[in-house]
Image (spheres, rainbow, N blue to C red):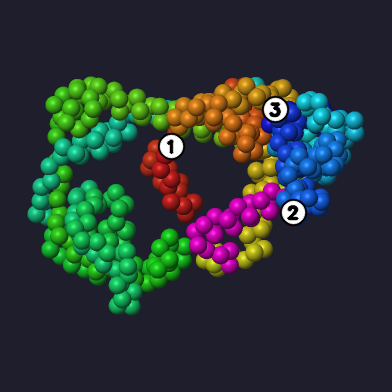
Amino acid sequence: MLNTTIERLDENKLRLDVEVPQNVLKGAIDDTLVYMGRELNIPGFRPGKVPPQAVLARLGREAVVGETIRVFIDDWYRAAVVSSGVRPVAQPEIEFDETDAGSGLNNAPLRFSATVEVAPKPKLPELATLEVEKPNLPNTKQYVDQVLEATLRGAGTLKDTGAAAKEGDEVVVDFRCTIEGEDVAGAAATGYQARIGDGRLLGELEEKIIGSEAGSTADVPVDFPEDHPMTQLAGQHATFHLSLNSVQTLELPELTDEVAAQVSEYTTAKELLDSIEAGIVARLEDEVAGIFRGNAVEALAKAAELEEPNALVESRQQELYAGLKQQLQQAGLTMEQYLDRSGRDTTELFEELAVSAREDLRRELVLLALAEDANIAVSEDDLLKEVADHAVHTGQAPDEAFQQVLSSGRADLLRGELLIQRTIDHLVATVKPKMVDMPTAEEAAAAAEANNEAPVEA
């Protein structure tokens, strides 16, 4: 892990003073010796099998350290850039004292400096005057009722309705799916139980079941979208052969101490209700905090004066494209298939990615500028605490977890992430909250429908 300090030389130029600790330098020297041992031919040793001690004796330690610096200095520079959050727009000018190559000889750290051109520093607004919408906590009763109902279902009693199915009824169905008369593997079930309206059944099947009585059968046509996750159904016109075996209603018991003990770890109804409400409040507080943080970053990015450098936008655009391509490969799709199914061409995709890249970059640049203004930094102790806090949840020893972070090269990336998170912490603690009511589930659904989107569950 490198130690990096930053000095702003002018509006768009920084100098990074980087210290490579002795343990990092030693590891790089060892790697260099192994590599050179594969390349050197020394009498008495097989080609490619020269041991490190022989390489060191033949070339001298100063030459080996110098070669190590030549090979690794670009990697150290990139690590320093990642950990400090700097976003260069051009190649750096790297300088180090030639006599400092002796660092590898005297157990001292190596120091070098890199002068880099960066985007002009954004002009930030006065944070205390920046109004940011923060949702009020909604009434928890509807959420408590929903969780309580789900909890009591385990003690409920199913009874045949003797009537046509309606939303909220419990049904048991058999179904199989065919395409052009051939059964589709993995798209059939016997004795499948679902509650009408909970989304476990396809919407077309639920629509057919509603109004039908137990014992009825039906053939239900379904047109699957091109991007359906089951490749054998994607873009296909299929038919579901449906049998409705039973229509029942679930009668829930009244919540008593005895029922609470039956359906939960608690011995009284009050303990169960208090636990449900506490869990819901904690979840909603996290949700509100997340919304507020996002709103604060967006408000800062919108209010800042900044022109995003095209070189950085294009670089971020390529990163987004590479990430999308990797996701598609993991899903078993090619970029050509994705574009075909989404009805876009490469030009349209890159235009969309350019917009996302510019927005992402703007948010990042204003946060980095704020970190500089507020003198926010992440120390090695901060990293150790972060790793230790995470290790508690995994059962791993903190020191062991920290060494894994160091050896994997993730320390500088983690430092950069913590820098951004701490900067957002400072931002939300400084801006002026503007309290607003969260939309109800019905309002969220109506807004999503107006935008031709499916509502997202909290």
Circle 3 packing at 10 Å, graded few (<14), some (14-19), many (20+), is many
Q: Is residue 151 left or right of residue 13?
A: left
The residue located at (54%, 29%) in the rendering is: 400
**Mark number for residue 393?**
none
Q: Is residue 138 left or right of residue 363?
A: left
Asked whether residue 310 appears in the rendered view, the answer is: no
The range drawn in magenta is: 314-336
- Alpha carbon distance from label 3 to label 2: 54 Å
First of labels 1, 2 by sequence position: 2
The residue located at (40%, 63%) in the rendering is: 230
Residue 279 on image: x %, y %:
35, 28
Q: Is residue 245 above or below residue 25?
A: below
| Quadrant of the frame with the N terminus | top right
Q: Nearer the viewer, mark 1 or mark 2?
A: 2
Dot 2 corresponds to which residue?
46
Q: How many marks?
A: 3
The residue located at (75%, 48%) in the rendering is: 50
Q: Nearer the viewer, mark 3 or mark 1?
A: 3
Residue type highlighted by circle 3:
Ala
**Mark number for residue 439?**
1
